[in-house]
Image: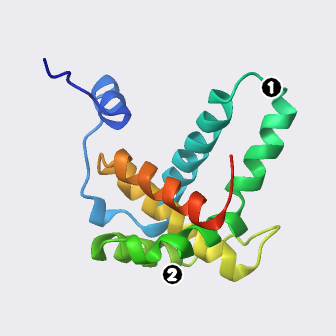
Amino acid sequence: MEESVTSLFDQISQTFGAKKADLKQYSGLTLAYIGDAIYDLIIRTLLVEQGNAPVNTLHKRASKVVKAETQARLIHAVLEDLTEEEQTVYKRGRNAKSATSAKNASINDYRTATGFEALMGYLYLNNQMDRALQLVKIGLEKIGETV
């Protein structure tokens, strides 16, 4: 018997009656905005699944992996694994002109991380969380980062 799986995005949309927009209409920064939260949720989930720990410890471990420098390394590690469409989304986010700047990262790492976050946002909004998870897993393995 096949089990029906509804994505978190679909559940939120259905519960609140949101209308699905054309993803090509979203700016790279809008995709990065939601993608930042999605990537953070993935990392936090991995940390919590390892067992109970003090919140400060969890925060320090998560911060190490979600910072711009690590995200930049991660996306560089998986660039060759991206489809053309995914590369286009990544570049749209990377090249977006942001009014804010990085506090603790180089401008290059910040923009590269924004591209990565845009890709995560795009995959989430396009109901491709399995692909987002796959890319994060491959990237973390390639850069030797443990969560």
Q: Is residue 118 visible?
A: yes
Residue at 44% over, 79% down: 91
The quadrant in which the N terminus is found is top left
* Amino acid found under the numbered disc labelled 2: Asn
- Residue 81 at x, y percent in the picture: 39, 71
Three-letter amino acid code at the position of disc 1? Ala
Q: Is residue 117 left or right of residue 58?
A: left
Query: Upstream in the sequence, badge 2 or badge 1?
Result: 1
Q: Residues within 10 Å of mark 2 (few under 14, many from 20)?
A: some
- For residue 53, the mark is 1
Residue 36 in the figure: left or right of residue 108: left
Residue at (59% x, 58% y) in the render? 140
Q: Residue at left 44%, top 72%?
A: 90
Please identify the residue farthest to the left as the structure is shown: 1
Residue at coordinates 54% horizontally, 72% vertically from top-left? 77
Q: Residues within 10 Å of mark 1 (few under 14, many from 20)?
A: few
Q: Secondary structure at mark 1?
A: loop
Label 2 SS: loop
> Do residues under tags 2 and 1 come within 8 Å of each other at their CB atoms?
no
77 or 54: which is nearer to us? 77
Q: Is residue 85 above or below residue 3?
A: below
- Residue 65 position in % (x across, y down): 70, 54
Colour scheme in the image?
A: rainbow
Outermost residue on the top side: it is 1
> Of the numbered discs in the image, which one, if any, rests on residue 141?
none
Task: Give the number of the disc on residue 95.
Answer: 2
Q: CA distance from mark 2 to mark 1?
A: 38 Å
Q: Nearer the viewer, residue 56 or 80?
A: 80
Q: Nearer the viewer, mark 2 or mark 1?
A: 1
Please tell me whether residue 77 is drawn above or below residue 7 in the rendered image.
Answer: below
